[in-house]
Every structure is written in C-alpha cells, then in structure tokens.
Image (spheres, grey):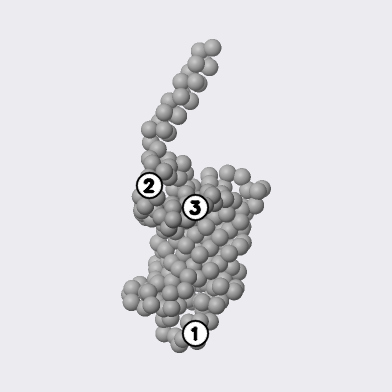
Amino acid sequence: MKVVNKTNVIIFSLLVLIISCTKSYQPAEYIQWAQLESTGLRITKDMFPYKFVLQYKSPNYITAINKINGIESELPSEQIIQFNLTIKSLDNKTNPIFNNGTNEDFHKKVQHFNDDGSEDFYLMIGADTILCSFCHMEYNYGVAPLSTIVLAFDIPNKIDNYYKQDWFLVYDDMVFDTGVIKIKIKKNDLMKLNLVKLI
C-alpha cells in the first residue's frame, strides 16, 4: 500500500511540475517563440556561399499563422510534418536563385523546385526514411535576397512516437552546388512543444 501511495505522489508531483512549466502564448507570441533559434525548432546551417535556415512548422505554428491572417481552420494533422527551408546568400545582397544567372536560369531553378524538387528532399526518423510529398518554392521574383521552399512529409502510421526521436532533413542539392546537406532537429527540442500552449 505504501508503494502505491509513493507512486501516486510521484505521478502527481510530475503532473504539477509539467503544468507549472507550461507556458501559454497568443498567436503572435507563439510564432515569435517558435522562431527563436534557442528553441531548436529553427536551425541555421552555413554552406558557403549560402545560409540555409530550416523552420519546423508544428500544427500549432500553422494554426497561429492562420489565426493572424484571419483564416479559420482545424488543427493540421500531426501525421504531416511541414517545414520552411529558406536559402540566403551570406552577403545578404543577392537572391540565391538569381545569383550570377539570367532570367531564364532563374525560372528554370524555380520550376525545378516546383516540378521535381520533392525528389531532392527526404526526412530520416530513426531507421525510417520518409520521402517528400510536397515541395513548392515561394515566388518573390528575385526581389528579396532569399528564397523559401515549403516542404511537407506524410508520416506513415507505422512510425510511432516520432516526436520522441531525432529528425534529419536531408537535401540532395541539385541547384546550389553545395552537395548533400543534413540538418538535425533534436528530440529534446521537439519535446519542448509539449510545454507550450497556443491560446
């Protein structure tokens, strides 16, 4: 009986600790929090002459953006993992897609991402490799010194507890001549999502 009581006390204490550590954010605050590199949900990797910035878009992150834009929507499926991959020139002056190229070259690169780009990306979770199911480059006409690629991966039902494992986004670069790029999202950082609530 004493063992049961001790177990109940420990469970209760842990629940109280989790609740006391949980933070609640309004949509704009949630987005700001998720975009801090200290959360580990936004990772930067320099590959000369470019900077790659990967932003994990959790279901709550997407919902927060929709709320700010006045879009009523259901919570996105947790079986779909979404990212934004932003590529910048390290000089922060030229658009990487337009760098040292012609208008025709620029359009070919954009078309590559929108037509065949999903073949360049995959997500590794434990022993599983998930192919990219959606790839789209946001078109900014080369005006901004960056390009953003929207990515989505459908997680098979057989993969359990994928938030409790490290993720590796792998980009087999066919456009920027940087080779294979691997970006790690740590399981400890993914677990932080359980301590933050969107209100």
The first of marks 1 and 3 along the sequence is 3
Q: x and y percent of residue 25 in the render?
A: 37, 45
- The residue under label 1 is 105
Q: Determine crowd level at label 2: few under 14, some 14-19, many 20+ residues with C-alpha closer than 10 A.
A: some
- The residue under label 3 is 72
Question: Is residue 131 shown left or right of residue 137?
Answer: right
Give the amino acid at mark 2: Gln
User: What element does badge 2 sit on?
Assistant: loop
User: What element does badge 3 sit on?
Assistant: loop
Real-space CA distance between mark 1 and mark 2, rounded to the nearest whole angstrom: 42 Å
Q: x and y percent of residue 90 in the render?
A: 35, 72
- The residue under label 2 is 26
The first of marks 1 and 2 along the sequence is 2
Q: Quadrant of the N terminus?
A: top right
User: What element does badge 1 sit on?
Assistant: helix
Q: Which mark is in front, 1 or 2? A: 2
Image: 163 above or below 116? above
Question: Is residue 145 shown left or right of residue 129?
Answer: left
Image: 199 above or below 53? above
